[in-house]
Amino acid sequence: MLKTLFVLAAITTGLLPNARAGADLTDAPAVAVTVDGVLADAGGLTYLESGDYLVPLRSTCEALGATQVEWDGEENCAYVTAPGLSLRVPFDREYIEANGRCWYIPGGVDIVSDRCMVPLSFLLWAFGAEAEDLGPVVAVTTSGAPITPGEDFYDGEALYWMSRIIHAEAGNQPFAGQIAVGNVVVNRTADEDFPDTVKDVIFDRRYGVQFTPAYSGSIYNSPSSDNVAAAKLALEGVETVDGALYFASRRAAQHCWASRHCEVVAEIAGHVFFGEELV
């Protein structure tokens, strides 16, 4: 039975879609990837890492119908063009892009034998393809349409404010910490104790000011491209902290309300993240 590799990864590792586990390499035999019955990785580079197959970018994209694959040395980035699809794969970032949407890659893309390796699940997501795991062969079928562009997928207002609160609160934090701040905002929109929209959560002050930058003015500073990518990932549902509703700097966390009433769910660099209030 055909199934997307998202489902395959979720079954084998418990991962959510649009997320990859750490960099521990599985000692699994090399696998072949075919696209509509044609071998896509003639070099035999594909391997399994933490529940996802990593495949060479160029040959797999060309097999999927890409018309152009280019490397930009100045930007340290690869660009892929296909009908209805544009990919951007920076080598020095923890995310890659498809039609202006983002996919999280902790630690960045892998380079094997001078080839850029990307998760096959990302390419399935981007190209709208499906895959069946047949053991030594992963059979990809090109049966769908490319992914919906970001300009049509993201709520413009939500992305605007999310990227700015991430810049203001976590612009100096690791990328995972930037996503984590976005997770707090998203989790609050789904919690009955907080407002329903990203903007209203950020400017909420029913229980006092929740996000200082919203009232200090730093919320209006322009975010970086990484801040925007972190905001997109949070809106895509990527989580680097599980169930966080509050966060504070390490110094403030020693005395804040959340430290006395909520469980610590994660610590990332300069921030401590807290979950729901303990009963």
Image (spheres, helix red, strand yellow):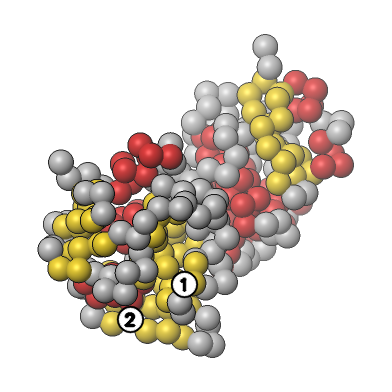
Q: Position of residue 203 (x, y in %)?
A: 63, 41
Residue at 75% across, 50% down: 269
Q: Is residue 276 above or below residue 84?
A: above
Say which mark, if any, is on residue 69: 2
Quarter holding the N terminus is top left
Does the image show residue 82? Answer: no
Q: Position of residue 135 (x, y in %)?
A: 26, 49
Distance from disc 2 to disc 1, alpha carbons, whole Å, reads 17 Å
Q: What residue is shown with label 1?
A: 112
> Which of the two labelled residues, at mark 2 and mark 1, occupies the earlier sequence position?
2
- Crowdedness of circle 2 by 10 Å Cα count: few (<14), some, many (20+)? some
Residue at 43% across, 37% down: 14
Amino acid type, residue under disc 2 in the picture: Val
Answer whether labels 2 and 1 touch (C-beta < 8 Å): no
Residue at 58% across, 50% down: 179
Quadrant of residue 152 within the rendered picture: bottom left
